[in-house]
Every structure is written in C-alpha cells, then in structure tokens.
Amino acid sequence: MIFNAIPIYVKIYVNKVEVTNLKSGQSVSSLSIQAFSTQRVVIADFNVLELCIRSLLNRELGIRTGFLPSRLKILIQQLIEVEGGLTEVEKRALRDLGE
C-alpha cells in the first residue's frame, strides 16, 4: 500500500549515526563532520544531529524528509551508556528527533 510507513532504526553513538531501513535491510552510518556530542552528553547539539540523520535518510537511503516527506515509523536508540541513565532532557531530545 502506498501509505504504509517505512520502518527506520536510528542508532546514536558519540558523533556517529547509523540508520537502517528495516523494510529493505539497507543500513548506512556516518561520522558527523561537526560534533554533536561532548564528554558529558551524547546529544549536545540537537540541530547538527538532526541534519546528520536527515542527510543519511535523503542521500544514502533515498527517503524524502523535506517537502512531502515519506511516512516513517522510527525507533531511535542511544547506544552509549551514560552514568545514571538518560535525563528527561535527553529523552525529550530523542523523542523530538523522531518527530
């Protein structure tokens, strides 16, 4: 069906992102040219990380994210352990990235 959502799995590391299209099995990863992580926080610069994810989706996987975007169902996971777990701000950042 034309309106089925594309299942996407996004893994976030320190200044690195891996995106997998779970429908096709295609997976791409990239080190960010501009750092989005610091020693204290994995997602220190939300906008840089968002652009990195959009770039991988658009250029590498051919999934539209701009005007008339493809419908996506996204699972985002931060794979770097942070002492004490994720803060509410980090959880919100992951949620906002998915939207």
Image: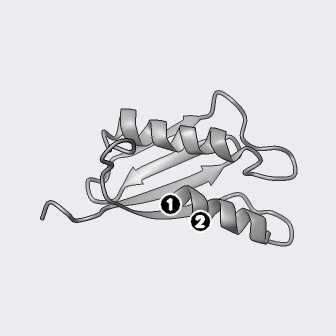
Residue annotated with mark 1: 99
Q: Is residue 22 left or right of residue 48?
A: left
Q: Which residue does the image show at 38% across and 37% down from the upper left?
A: 58
Which coloring applies here?
one colour
- Residue 31, quarter of the rendered image: top right
Split into 4 quadrants, where in the image is the N terminus?
bottom left
The answer to whether residue 22 is above or below residue 55 is below
Nearer to me, 66 or 6: 66
* Residue contact at pointers 2 and 1, CB within 8 angstroms: yes
> Residue lying farthest left?
1
- Residue 3, quarter of the rendered image: bottom left
Q: Is residue 67 left or right of residue 52?
A: left
> Residue lying farthest front?
67
- The x, y position of residue 34, in whole percent, is 69, 29
The answer to whether residue 11 is above or below residue 58 is below
Give the CA separation, mark 2 to mark 1: 7 Å
Residue 47 visible from this viewpoint: yes
Q: Is residue 29 left or right of residue 66?
A: right
Nearer to me, 36 or 2: 2
Of helix, strand and loop, which one carries label 2? helix
The answer to whether residue 14 is above or below residue 22 is above
- Residue 61, quarter of the rendered image: top left
Amino acid, disc 2: Arg
Q: Callout 2: 10 Å neighbours few (<14), some, many (20+)? A: few
Residue annotated with mark 2: 95
Q: Is residue 46 left or right of residue 67?
A: right
Residue 86 visible from this viewpoint: no
> Residue lying farthest top?
33
Of helix, strand and loop, which one carries label 1? loop
